[in-house]
């Protein structure tokens, strides 16, 4: 899907904020991301210590007009996503996405460390 979508001109980008040392799950994510990057996605990594001023929750942006904020329980179980289309909220999260993007390290550079 990623390969076809990027061939059609769509972009898939992602910043993963991670803590060091990486958990087993984060290590697995770095390993798997080599395949989605090869398909055309651009995944970057940002160490949590460099994420000051960014939200402390996960979210996805779709076409800079729809936000899905992820909600997790105390046990880290996924509780669901909240769809938000309020332009002011989406713009604020777009700013945070851009700030994270500029601080983040390309996947291959991060994995090499």
Image: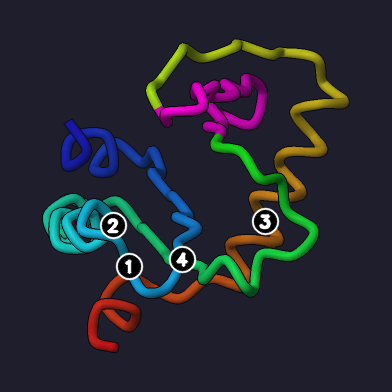
**Residue 103 location (% of width, % of height):** 62, 73
Q: Residue at x 16, y 56 (%)?
A: 28
Q: Which residue is mark 2?
A: 26
Q: Which residues are magenta?
A: 59-76
Q: What is the total number of numbered labels drawn onto the structure image?
A: 4
Q: Secondary structure at mark 4?
A: loop
Residue 55 in picture, x, y percent from top left: 71, 45
Proximity of marks 3 and 1: CB atoms separated by less than 8 Å: no
Mark carried by residue 22: 1
- From the viewer's perspective, is 76 left or right of 7? right
Compare marks 4 and 2 and give the one earlier in the sequence: 4
Q: Which numbered circle lies on residue 19?
A: 4
**How busy is the neighbourhood of tag 1: few (under 14 within 10 Å), some, or many (20 plus)?**
few
Dot placed on the residue nearer the N-terminal end, 3 or 2: 2
Closer-to-camera residue (95/82) = 82
From what the image shows, is residue 98 above or below residue 9? below
Residue 54: image x %, image y %? 73, 53
The quadrant of the rendering that contains the N terminus is top left
The quadrant of the picture occupied by the C terminus is bottom left
Q: Which residue lies at the image location 23% right of the left edge and 43% below the top edge?
A: 7
Find out whether the residues at labels 3 and 2 contact each other: C-beta distance under 8 Å.
no
Query: What distance separates the C-alpha of mark 3 from that of mark 2?
Result: 22 Å
- Proximity of marks 2 and 1: CB atoms separated by less than 8 Å: yes
**Residue drawn at 32 percent across, 70 percent down:** 107
Mark whose residue sits in front, 3 or 1: 1
Real-space Cα separation, disc 4 to disc 2, in angstroms: 9 Å
Q: Which residue is mark 3?
A: 98
């Amino acid at each position: 899907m990623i390969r076809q979508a990027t061939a059609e001109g769509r972009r898939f980008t992602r910043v993963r904020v991670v803590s060091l040392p990486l958990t087993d799950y984060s290590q697995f994510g770095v390993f798997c991301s080599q395949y989605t990057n090869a398909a055309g996605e651009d995944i970057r990594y940002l160490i949590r210590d460099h994420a000051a001023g960014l939200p402390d929750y996960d979210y996805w942006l779709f076409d800079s007009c729809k936000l899905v904020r992820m909600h997790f329980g105390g046990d880290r179980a996924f509780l669901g996503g909240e769809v938000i289309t309020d332009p002011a909220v989406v713009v604020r999260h777009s700013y945070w996405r851009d700030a994270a993007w500029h601080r983040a390290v390309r996947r291959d550079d991060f994995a090499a460390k």
